Structure formats: structure tokens, C-alpha cells
Image (tube, rainbow, N blue to C red):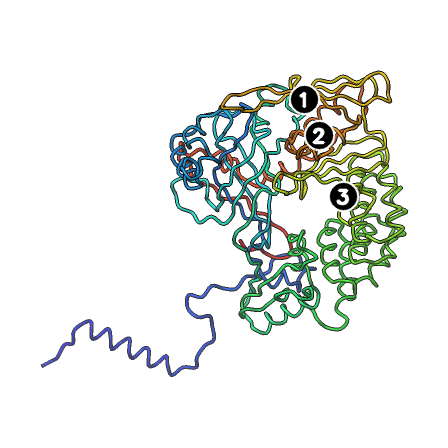
Amino acid sequence: MILRMPRALTAGLVLLVVSLSTGCQPKQAGRVPGASPGATYRGPSYLNGTIGSLTQTRHNRPQIVTGYGLVVDLAGTGSSEVPQQLRQWIINDMTKRGVGLARYEDIFPLSPEQMLASDRTAVVRVVGFIPTGAVAGTRFDVLVEAADGRTTSLAGGRLWSCDLAPGGNQPGVFVDPIAQADGPMFVSPTDPAAQTRFEIQDYQRRAVVVTGGVLKKSRPLELVLNQSSRSRAGAISDRLNERFPAAPGARRPTANAISPLVVQLAVPAQYRDRPEHFVQLVRHLSADRSPDAVPRYAQYLAEQLIADPTRGASVRLAWEALGPAAGIVLEHYYRHERMDVALAALHVGAALGDETAAGPLQELASHEDAAVRLSVADSLRGLPRSTRGESALLTLLDDASQEVRIAAYNTLVATGNPLVNRQELLDNDGSLRMVIDLLPIGEPLVYITQERYPRLVIFGRDAGFPAPTSAAIWDGRLRVSRADDPKQPARMLFQRSEIEDGQRVTKSSVHDFYPSFATLAYVLAHHWTGDNDPQLGFNLTYGEAVDAVYQMARQPGIDAAVHVDRGLFTRLLEGTQPDERNQRPETGEASPAARGATGGAGGTGS
């Protein structure tokens, strides 16, 4: 009789025999089944061997955070229109913050519904960008846009404290807030390109709260090795700590290999204001630690730049990443026959503190090409105590190009040069409202910028109003006049709307002042504290003060150029997809991803 085994048992025996037979064979090396392959460097060959070619960077991009908030204190330019699906969410948020509660009635006398019904408020979308390597407490700029169709202007308003989070523009969906934002609106002076009233109004519906965001949770920077290796992670960490040592007393080193796969980074104090630049230097730093590696690689980079001018940006970074030891090679190229090579070497030499770069830079400050002079102004940031460097900056401050003059000023500010005469104006709570910088050099120029903090910059000794002067601004609410006698002061008539006993009233003030743009801005923005304060002030926001100066400088008969830095608006707007900014809760549109930045040696992580 033939016995037949069940099929399942037969199959099991076959598998057992196969496994036993293969177990007797030599074991073959290979990846653990299911493991992801390591990343492969696909960047330019001349950057092979840099830390960027051996790792990916995690959290090296600005992180977009969004939310909704309420702007208050508008001069009747707000709206009671609120998308229905957003209304209850806003009311709940206001209640959570104490609006309408009996114990806060002295501070918030109105209910949330009453506040939303006022034309002095507007519901807004808020978008912010948390910078690379930011730690808890880092401040950042936020973009604010009216969420309804009837708000005509956000000028003069203040954003109430609101929460921000990735995906925070979806009311009703729980997200964990990682930041908050509040502060006064800055509406950029009317865009000269806006030709119609509709375009001007649309421009006024968008504002920036300069440094209005604050991060509540740190975002650690990490390097993730392409191939897991404890020894390589340790070597990369040692290389970074040699090149970028932490400041004395720092809580942790610049680099720390926390595993065979991950090196954690801390932004050194000297790069705290430029974390993105620090990340680029890290990625462009050669990992070679042999004794002659720095001069050898610096020379190799010079040859690469000479062979291909398009490599200039990455060669600069790789040179600077090498540190002062690269200077012995760089100085041979300070007077190179090709201007792009010379400027690259001089820029890095100055950034590394090489005083011998000051002489050639001083000579190039009078070059016929404005692009060369602009590069010189930027390069001199690395030589803050150079006599020749300061002489070059004085030449550039009186340049025919506005861009060159502004670049020279920015270098003076970055290096703390006392040539800049600074006046700081404070908010009611003691925080910085705005800065007025005076540079009595060259022709009159008014420069308005919010880079890092709100600023009004006045160039020229005679940046004032000629006699006679008569100007009406803001539909006549602000009038400035000056008599025929040039020795007499200018006179300001200012009308503003205020709420008294629940009623809106118009108040007028007259003030004599020294006829200059700087004084006009100071009087408008200064917070007058009472009879003991000798300087009268109208306590206007930075945006209102600089708009008045902008409008005044464009009056007929006033000879002053005006340059408005719209870079902050541009950076914030270009960093978000249009749908991210314009998403309305009533449409049910999906939340799009932020547009990521790319660049640097090797790949990048999210």
C-alpha cells in the first residue's frame, strides 16, 4: 500500500530540505532584506569629498507655518465679512484668549461677535517661514492677507496673537501649534506699478508683521550620512568642530555624532543671523583632514573656477568653508586678470579676515562697472576694522548707483560702524518699533527696508523740505507746510480718528518741527508719554510713518530719490504657492505643499 502525505506536509518538507541545503552553502554578504539603499552623490565632481557629498541635510529648509488671525485697530477699512466655516473657529479662538469673559471685560469690553461685526477689524490669513536651524525663541517675519473680499486696507492695524502650525490654515482640523504671531501691520508704500485704484486697494490688503512670529519649538539641524558608518560620522563631527568651534561656554559642540547615521548640528554664535549660510558652508566643507589638504584643495578649486566661470558661487562657498588656511592660495588671485576670479578671491579673503584684500578692494571701489562696485561693498563686511575698507565704503556711499550706496550702508550696519547715526523708537511695551538711520553723505536718498527690523534710512546732508513747501497726504489728514522764510520751521497738521465713549471722533493736532524727512518720521512714530516728555509724538506705526515720508518725498519740488525694499514681501510671497495664500475654508481646497529651496553640495533633506 502506498501512503500519501497531505500536500501541506509535503510542501513543508520541501521547504525544510531547501533551507537545510542552502544553509550548508557559504553565507553571501548583502543588505538586510527590506533595507533602503544608501543615498548616492550626484553633484559636480569637483565637490566630491565634501561633507555635502557624503550626507543629506535634514531640516535645512525654511518651514512654512500658517494660521488665521484677527487684525484690530483699523481706521474703518476692515470688514464684518467672515467665511461661514471660519466664523465659529475665530469666535472660539477669541473666547479662548479671554474676549467676552466677565473677568476681562475691562480689557475686552466687546463680545467676539461684536468685534467681528466692526469695520475696525478684519479676519486674515497668516503665513510665516521659520528659518533654517531656528531654536525656540527665534523671531521671524509673517505675511498677512485679508481673508474676506471687503477689507480695503490693513494699514495701521495690529495682528492679535494667533497660533501658527504646518497646515494651520485648515480650521476644524487639529494641528499642534509650533509658533505664535502678533504685532503691527506694515503695508508697503503704494506700489508705483499699481495704476488703478483696484490694484492699489488690493496691494493695501496685504501686510507684513516684521519679526512678528516667534518659534516655540526648536528645529534641530541634522546631517544624515549616505552610508551608515560610526567612524565616518565621528570624522565628520571632528572636522566640523575643528573648522567651526563652539563659542566658550556653549552648551554643546557645533557637531555631535549621535549615531552611525546622524550628526546633529548647532549653529555657532557667529552665524546665528545667517544660519542658511552656515549650512551651505558645512555642505561645501572638504572632509579631508590630511595635513596639506586645505591648500591643495583651494588650488584645485581655483583651477575649476578658471576653467568654468559658472562655478563661481560654489567655489566661493568651498573656499570660505576651508577657513583662514586657504588664504595663502587666495591672495595669489586678488589681482587676477579675470575680474570674476579676482572678485571671488577677494570676497572670500575678506570674509576670512585677510587685511591684504583691503587694498585691491579699495581700488575697485572706483571701478567703472557698477556690478564690481556692488560686489566690493558686499565683500567689505568681512573687514570691519580696516582703515582702507572704511575709506572704500565712504567712496561707495556717495556712488551714482542707489544699489551701491544701499549695499555700502548695509555693510556699515552689519559691522556696527559708527558712521551710521541711529535713533531707535520704541513701542508702548518697550519693544522696538522702528529705527531711523542717518548718513549725511551724498545726494538725498530715502531708503525704506524691513530687513531684520523696521528701518527708515536717510542719506544726504540736505534731506529736507525746501521753502516754500505745501503738501497734503492721506486725503488731507496730514498736511505739511513751510513758509517762505527758510529759517522758520515746518508746520504739521494731523487729523486722526479715535473712539471716545463708543463714538468715533476726529481730533486735530498742530506741531512745528525741523523740516526734514527724519524729523517728520520721528514725530509721527514717537510715543508721547506726557508732560515730562519734551518731544511731541503721534504714536503711529512704522508703516504709517514711512508711508508719510514716502508720500512727502514724491511731492513736486522735493528733490529726493526714494528706494523701497520690497524684498521682504517678495520673499514671503514667492515662498508660498498661490493656493496656500488664497485658500478659503469655504472652498474645501486641499492644502498644498510649500515650495522648497534647493542648492548646495549634494542632495538635501526635508
Mark 3–mark 1 distance (CA, rounded to whole Å): 36 Å
Location of mark 1 (residue):
509
Q: Considering only order in the chain, which callout, 1 or 2, is on the residue closer to the N terminus?
A: 1
Percent of width and height locating residue 595:
55, 44
Mark 2–mark 1 distance (CA, rounded to whole Å): 10 Å
Q: Residue at x 45, y 66 (%)?
A: 35
Q: Residue at x 54, y 55 (%)?
A: 218
Q: Is residue 544 shown above or below 289? A: above
Q: Secondary structure at mark 2?
A: loop
Percent of width and height locating residue 219:
54, 55
> Looking at the image, do the residues carrying marks 2 and 1 touch, with CB atoms under 8 Å apart?
yes
> Looking at the image, do the residues carrying marks 2 and 3 touch, with CB atoms under 8 Å apart?
no
Mark 2–mark 3 distance (CA, rounded to whole Å): 30 Å
Location of mark 2 (residue):
536
Q: Secondary structure at mark 3?
A: helix
Location of mark 3 (residue):
410
Q: Decide: few, some or many residues near mark 1? Use Cα within 10 Å; few <14, some 14-19, many ≥20.
A: few
Q: Considering only order in the chain, which callout, 3 or 2, is on the residue closer to the N terminus?
A: 3
In the rendered structure, the answer to whether residue 141 lies left or right of residue 367 reads left
Identify which residue, 22 or 561, lies in the foreground. 561
Instruction: Name which quarter of the figure residue 295 lies in.
Output: bottom right
User: As drawn, which residue projects farthest toward the left?
Assistant: 1
In the rendered structure, the answer to whether residue 87 lies left or right of residue 50 reads left
Identify which residue, 510 or 379, lies in the foreground. 510
User: As drawn, which residue projects farthest toward the bottom?
Assistant: 24
What amino acid type should be assigned to the residue bearing mark 3?
Asn
